[in-house]
Image (spheres, rainbow, N blue to C red):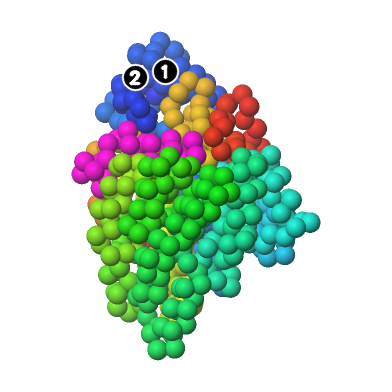
Amino acid sequence: MSVLIKGGRIITAADDYVGDVYVDGERISLIGESLDVQADKVIEAAGKYVLPGCIDPHTHLDMPFGGTVTIDDVESGQTAAAFGGTTCHVDFIIQPKGSTFADAFEDWRGKANGKQVIDMGYHMAVTDLHEGGTLEELASLPDQGITSYKLFMAYKGALMVDDETLFRTMEVAAETGALVMVHAENGDAIDVLVKQALAAGRTEPKYHALTRPPETEGEATNRAIQLARVAGSPLYVVHVSCREAVEPIARAREAGWNVHGETCTQYFFVDYSFLERPDFEGAKYVYTPPPRAKENQDVLWNAVRTDTLSVISTDHCAFLWDGQKTIGRDDFSKIPNGGPGLENRLHMIHEFGVRTGRITLNRMVELLCTNPAKLFGLYPRKGTIAVGSDADIVVFDPERKFTISAQTQHSKTDYNLYEGTKVTGAPDVVLLRGQVLVEGDELVAEPGIGQFVKRAKFGEELKPERAAATA
Ligand code: URP
Ligand code: ZN
Ligand code: ZN
């Protein structure tokens, strides 16, 4: 199968020019002006943007959490992703306590079997590390293409690890070339605040935020940065939500430390007041870290513009409002933490980042495609438009009007964080390794088309000829 994308505005992290892209099989094989080639399929892209497929490095599909399981499995979550122009994501395997990493990996592969709509890799969330077992096993993961370890510094009694586990994992990463990712909040202090709130009869959704003040995020972010410095490992701080966490990352990066940070789409748009919505509607916005005071939104836009934060992910962790979030109707601490977003990241960041002039188109591509690919061992196979790269391409119509709504979304959840938001600009055609995945409102490809991608170690490139992928 060959595809010719004619006359589009090709936008990468560095370039912006009009040209043709010729795809032969799974890869981009020619880029040029008015290419004189025959193709099985021609896509007229005049007036459209030709973007690399977006990469979401932070998702939770089919994940047991908070006494239930996220509502989007691999098929529904990846279908939602595809309609939003995301062609590759990195999901979290959660090591059940007492389990080996090998068993956890097999379990997570089983969840994806035959269901994959887009390409995917995995991070390993470490919950249980002991000598003479998982500590040694951890070192073997990068050779299997799992090149990032995730640690939760919060969720006491569930996923949280102590500083010894965090530090030992960092030491292993320094040896193996893996990237350490942290959910940075002080879980011990939060646990005390939650118990005090409940004892005082404070049960509504807003107390989710009031018991997780920004200082607890700032403290844990700084602690992780300092410990990674001692261990000599690279560090990536996930879902940064507030000034208190941005500042230590900025300081570390100014000092030239190997520290990186992401924020998520929702932190630009949803603020603390959403949690105060009546009739339990606030529960829709119970995710962690919580929605913050509105002034943090400008701090985050500034941080992504200046590269203090290098990635915008979604942290897609979707639950039904009616039936799952309601587990915590009488106790905010029982509301499953997480929100949807995989489908609308590109819509929202294009509309409110690019169209308002907060970031450039190139920077949008860098934040949504190229930086995730570079940081997570997928570049240059993915994350850019270049000869030899996978033909993961979004033909994006910057004039297409689109209204975001739970009624029309592909995620299985029953609400949308951005309900009713009108945007101008949406994907028209999405290609995955040269095959048409989405055309207009249709999912053209069958589940099973997506592959597991073995990622390169931190700082190494995933060259097309070296890339090993299995269905
Ligand atoms: O509330 C959230 N973010 N749920 C997903 C798990 C996590 O902390 O990333
Ligand atoms: Zn988290
Ligand atoms: Zn998450």
Instruction: Please name the residue shown 49% across and 37% down the image.
Output: 373
Determine which residue is flagged by label 1: 31
Residue at x-position 40% and y-position 10%: 36
Q: Tell me the residue that label 2 is attached to.
A: 19
Dividing the image into 4 quarters, which one contains the C terminus? top right
Seen from the viewer's position, the closer of residues 69 and 443 is 69
Instruction: Tell me the amino acid under the disc marked 1.
Output: Ile
**Which residue is painted at 46% across and 17% down in the image?**
30
Q: Which residues are magenta?
A: 350-375
Q: Label 2 neighbourhood size at 10 Å, few (<14), some (14-19), many (20+)?
A: some
The residue closer to the viewer here, 311 or 467, is: 311
Assess disc 1: are there few (<14), some (14-19) or many (≥20) residues with their C-alpha within 10 Å of its C-alpha. Answer: some
Q: Quadrant of residue 282?
A: bottom left
Which residue does the image show at 39% across and 53% down from the upper left? 248
Residue furthest out toward the left: 356
Is 105 placed left or right of 455 in the picture?
A: right
Q: Is residue 62 magenta?
A: no
> Is there CB contact under 8 Å for labels 1 and 2?
yes
Q: Looking at the rendered structure, which numbered label has been put on residue 120?
A: none
From the viewer's side, name the closer residue of 101 and 388. Answer: 101
Would you identify the image quadrant in which residue 278 lies? bottom left
Residue 23 image offset from top left, x and y in percent: 48, 22
Is the residue marked 2 within 8 Å of ligand 3, measured from its CB? no
Main SS, magenta residues: helix
281 to the left or right of 159: left
Can residue 255 be seen by looking at this rendering?
A: yes
Q: Is residue 229 above or below residue 198?
A: above
Q: CA distance from mark 1 to mark 2?
A: 7 Å
Q: Secondary structure at mark 1?
A: strand
The answer to which image quadrant residue 360 occupies is top left
> Which amino acid is tagged 2?
Gly
Q: Which circle's residue, 1 or 2, is located before the other in the chain?
A: 2
